[in-house]
């Protein structure tokens, strides 16, 4: 056997004694008896000894660095591992222990062993070179996997630091007979808070808001203790192209900078080796626990599914640090968004102050509550109460979620002509009719699915169609999930399905509707990919990547008839608002208004369901949201909740009167003003094109007035108004706001 000169080290498989020298993982794997796609039995003790040797031989301790006034990043010259990351401007040691550095990880399943990883910490880099003052190039060749020996491939990365932005570009050339399903890169071996034990959240853009999950000093395991070795959280780019790591006064922005959605990327957090307790999920506040290093791993997991003998270019991953709260983090996304976002066409009526009613006329249990011929009664109520649009739900065959994606009219509700005539009547009364649809699900029990749509269903790697359980309506049987209409997920990457969906969509245009609302446009649960072999492309197909081509087909169909046809969707992802510019969503007191902050003029429609829903209506005023009246959970008359309707009219009248400040202005959330009050309150800020400001202050107290002080830098003349007293009055001193009410301060 060839000697490598390492004397005195006994290798675990009895390979003999060798002297000093560099032994890479490939050589070590061969010495250990690993052949390509083969495996050997090994003890835990042997594995630990091997890992120790490998770690020592792949890492040289010599670093190559990039730095500017904002960031410092370092890589090990021998392994290519990212060893240190620091925010220089604030002294934040994001990653400070080189021994925790990792380069990458790949999942390369074998025919008889899917859990076969290529671990970067067990490989030597073929090249780690600083090619300019702001750029490093790294390359790894023919790494050895855990159980399959050498995997012929080349993985290259270019890391660039420019103007405070750290960008990772990478390419995989897979020369092996294996599919490389995922690649974790970059991999941050530790992600420390700015100060030990500081509160930190991972935040992402989802359902028009910015939900967060704590990662310090507590860390919730979102993947189930049975499924992972370490507490784990993930954020999927199917809903958000960015995530924020938000501390008290600063944060990190990480973005997948490819708006074409070529594949799924997961921002992944792992708290190693675990948590202090299982009650509070506390993170250990020490260097080691149970003999293991304590550290929070962060990595970007690319689901590339690189086929044998293929080359895959990865989406860029960009990291930026910032000062401030989530607004400053989202500003990083807005900066990049401005380079690719195409502003959509929006019908003129949508841009004005107006309100909607959502109305369900049939559920999935054939209740047939409102026949088509009775719709004029509801239309007249909208006209009489100044409501501009009706979102009509359950109008199609089978009722709401009954026989999706069919958009035929339902004989139980009446005839096609009766619905067409009702829509024409709505137009004559100044009411826009928006038809509800759900094209990317298919009810399994229908003949339509059995005879045609089943051919376009997204299937898993085992050839089984993905399914979701459907929703429950009306009857005790269905509310107990006994007879729900279970549904298949359609493959939007399949051109034949897109044609079938477009054929259904055209039925809404033919009825004369003013628009449609695509329910659940934001997800394809539980499927991300389709592995169907006969859908006209090489699988797998990333389903979310097919949403935009499908939307373009819909637009082409409607533009031939009505260029002002409104495309709306339930909380579309930000990139999808290029095609579905009106978003329907729901909020609560904890919702961060991320979509509104990203696009101050985007039409966003929010449900109002309470019978005296002043608190929700006040929020809609503060966040410039359109009112969607939904009495009896969108099954009643507008007049069913007179108190909510009366107050909603006052809210719309107020923002119509002060439209320049409250509707046409830029939403700044809490930026640009300081407000203090002697009770529970909330405030938002708007800035007009002329630089004039408005501050909306909500009194959240249920039974007492509050006194609020409003401070603006260099203010002009300030006046204020309320829904109850809309005539402006000079603001002199504190602002007195009645309970459950709101006041608007305007700079004139």
Image (tube, rainbow, N blue to C red):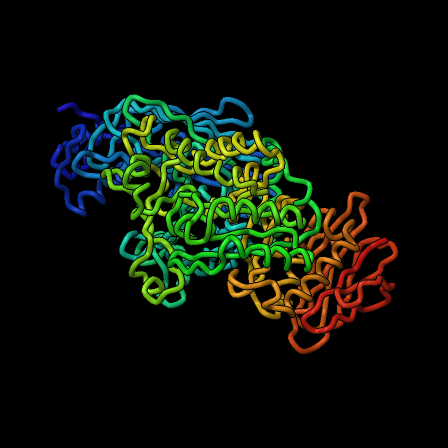
Q: In this view, does 473 lie to the left or right of 167?
A: left
How many tags in the picture? 0
- Residue 319: tell me if it is visible: no
Q: Which residue is drawn at 75% across and 49% down?
A: 687
Image location of residue 483, percent across then percent down: 30, 58
Q: Is residue 121 above or below residue 36?
A: below
**Residue 624 position within the rendered picture, expressed as x and y whole percent measured from the top left:** 67, 53
Q: Nearer the viewer, residue 266 or 479?
A: 479
Q: Residue at x 16, y 23 (%)?
A: 2
Q: Position of residue 226 (x, y in %)?
A: 27, 56
Residue 277: which quarter of the image?
bottom left
Question: Is 688 in front, or is 113?
Answer: 688
Residue 307: percent from left, percent from top: 30, 27
Given residues 238 and 482, the one toward you in this image is 482
Q: Image quadrant for the N terminus?
A: top left
Horizontal side of residue 429 vs 410, given as left or right: right
């Amino acid at each position: 056997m060839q000697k490598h000169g390492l004397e005195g080290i006994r290798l675990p498989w009895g390979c003999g004694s060798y002297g000093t020298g560099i032994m890479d993982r490939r050589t070590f794997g061969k010495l250990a008896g690993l052949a390509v796609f083969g495996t050997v039995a090994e003890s835990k003790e042997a594995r630990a000894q091997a890992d120790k040797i490998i770690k020592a031989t792949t890492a040289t301790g010599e670093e190559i660095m990039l730095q500017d006034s904002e960031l410092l990043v370092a890589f090990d010259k021998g392994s290519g591992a990212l060893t240190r990351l620091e925010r220089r401007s604030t002294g934040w040691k994001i990653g400070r222990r080189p021994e925790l550095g990792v380069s990458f990880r790949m999942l390369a399943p074998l025919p008889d062993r899917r859990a076969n990883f290529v671990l970067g910490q067990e490989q030597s880099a073929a090249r780690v070179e600083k090619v300019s003052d702001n750029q490093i190039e790294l390359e790894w060749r023919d790494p050895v996997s855990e159980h399959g020996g050498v995997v012929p491939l080349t993985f290259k990365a270019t890391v660039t630091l420019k103007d405070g932005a750290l960008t990772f570009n990478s390419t995989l050339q897979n020369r092996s007979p294996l599919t490389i399903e995922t690649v974790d890169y970059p991999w941050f071996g530790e992600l420390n808070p700015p100060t030990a034990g500081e509160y930190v959240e991972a935040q992402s853009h989802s359902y028009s808001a910015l939900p967060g999950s704590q990662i310090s000093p507590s860390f919730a395991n979102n993947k189930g203790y049975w499924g992972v070795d370490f507490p784990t959280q993930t954020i999927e780019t199917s809903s958000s192209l960015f995530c924020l790591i938000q501390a008290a006064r600063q944060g990190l922005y990480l973005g997948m900078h490819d708006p074409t959605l070529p594949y799924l990327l997961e921002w992944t957090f792992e708290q190693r080796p675990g948590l202090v307790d299982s009650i509070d999920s506390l993170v250990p506040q020490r260097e080691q626990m149970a003999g293991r290093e304590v550290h929070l791993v962060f990595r970007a997991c690319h689901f590339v599914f690189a086929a044998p003998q293929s080359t895959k270019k990865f989406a860029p991953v960009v990291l930026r640090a910032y000062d401030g709260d989530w607004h400053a983090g989202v500003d990083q996304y807005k900066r990049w968004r401005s380079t690719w976002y195409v502003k959509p066409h929006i019908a003129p009526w949508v841009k004005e102050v107006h309100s909607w009613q959502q109305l369900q006329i049939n559920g999935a249990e054939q209740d047939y509550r409102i026949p088509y011929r009775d719709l004029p009664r509801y239309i007249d109520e909208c006209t009489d109460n100044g409501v501009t649009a009706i979102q009509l739900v359950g109008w199609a065959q089978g009722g709401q979620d009954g026989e999706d994606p069919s958009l035929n009219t339902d004989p139980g509700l009446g005839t096609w002509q009766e619905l067409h005539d009702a829509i024409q009547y709505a137009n004559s009364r100044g009411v826009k009719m928006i038809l509800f649809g759900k094209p990317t699900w298919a009810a399994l029990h229908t003949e339509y699915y059995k005879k045609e749509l089943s051919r376009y269903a997204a299937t898993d790697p085992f050839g089984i169609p993905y399914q979701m359980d459907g929703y429950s309506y009306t009857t005790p049987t269905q509310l107990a999930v006994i007879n729900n209409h279970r549904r298949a997920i359609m493959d939007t990457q399949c051109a034949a399905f897109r044609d079938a969906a477009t054929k259904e969509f055209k039925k809404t245009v033919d009825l004369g509707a003013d628009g449609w609302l695509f329910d659940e446009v934001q997800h394809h649960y539980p499927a991300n990919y389709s592995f169907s072999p006969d859908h006209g492309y090489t699988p797998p197909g990333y389903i979310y990547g097919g949403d935009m081509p499908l939307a373009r087909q819909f637009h082409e169909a409607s533009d031939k008839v009505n260029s002002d046809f409104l495309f709306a969707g339930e909380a579309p992802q930000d990139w999808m608002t290029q095609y579905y510019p009106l978003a329907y969503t729901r909020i609560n007191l904890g919702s961060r208004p991320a979509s509104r902050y990203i696009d101050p003029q985007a039409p966003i429609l929010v449900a109002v369901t309470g019978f005296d829903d002043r608190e929700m209506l006040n929020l809609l005023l503060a966040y410039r949201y359109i009112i969607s009246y939904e009495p009896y959970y969108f099954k009643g008359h507008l007049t069913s909740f007179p108190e909510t309707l009366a107050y909603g009219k006052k809210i719309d009248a107020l923002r119509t009167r002060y439209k320049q400040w409250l509707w046409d202005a830029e939403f700044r959330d809490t930026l640009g003003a300081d407000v203090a009050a002697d009770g529970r309150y909330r405030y938002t800020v708007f800035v007009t094109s002329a630089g004039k400001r408005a501050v909306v202050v909500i009194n959240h107290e249920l039974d007492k007035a509050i006194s609020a002080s409003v401070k603006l830098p260099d203010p002009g003349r300030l006046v204020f108004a309320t829904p109850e007293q809309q005539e402006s009055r000079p603001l002199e001193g504190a602002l007195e706001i009645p309970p459950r009410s709101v006041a608007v301060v305007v700079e004139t």
